[in-house]
Image (cartoon, helix red, strand yellow):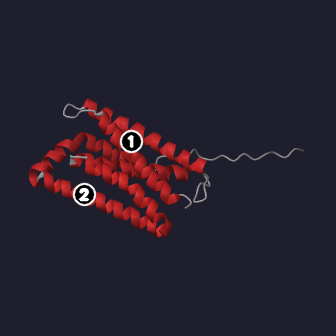
Amino acid sequence: MRARASIIVRPPPEYLSPMSCIIMALILLLSVIGRPLFNLTRDLVGRSTISHVVWVLLGLGCVGGVHVVRRLGAQRLLPVTLLLLPGLFVALSLELPEERMHLLEFGALGFCLCWDSFRSFEGLRRNAPVIDLLRTLIIACTIGIVFACLDEGVQALLPERVADMRDIFLNSFSIFWGAALCLLAKSKS
């Protein structure tokens, strides 16, 4: 009598957690109602107040990111700080507060997508080989960039909005930025 080989059935990888889906839904919602909401807020409190609030949110996000990574190990503080600098430089170069929000929205999406990709690969933890880290980054950024294009496509269909390649590039940078921060936080130092 032959012994039967047991087949292990694993569920398919889950690249999208509920948190990533919530962030994507919020981004699409803001694509539709964001401009009227921004205009109403600007009329009520003024553009400079909105700009200050966005800067505070960016600052809190950076401080929070450094704090989380610092808890993971002080040796990662310098690389994370160096990775945060390009994002801050891009934020400084943007004139409109709503453009700075792209850094927050899509940076958080990139971080969550990368985190989801990490969870998808069984055994991919702190001691992961570089090729697995790159695969994680590529999957997260691909999903994010496709979503950024979808977001701009939705905006092209709305009468009061316009699709802009510059936004796609900014969203792609933000996704890569968030995913790279996640990789740095999760990878071996």
- Give the image location of residue 107, x and y in percent: 37, 50
Identified at 90% across, 44% down, the residue is 1
- Give the image location of residue 57, x and y in percent: 27, 59
Counting residues from the start of the chain, the first of labels 1 and 2 encountered is 2
Q: Are marks 1 and 2 in contact (CB under 8 Å)?
A: no
Identified at 46% across, 55% down, the residue is 182
- Give the image location of residue 136, x and y in percent: 53, 47
Give neighbour class at mark 2: few <14, some 14-19, many 20+ (Cα, 10 Å).
some
Q: What residue type is labelled 2?
A: Trp
| Residue at which label 1 appears | 172
Q: Horizontal placement of 163 versus 20: left or right?
A: left
Q: In what element is the residue under mark 2?
A: helix
Q: Is residue 127 above or below residue 113?
A: below
Give neighbour class at mark 1: few <14, some 14-19, many 20+ (Cα, 10 Å).
many
| Residue at which label 2 appears | 55
Evaluate whether residue 121 shows in this view: no
Evaluate whether residue 71 shows in this view: yes
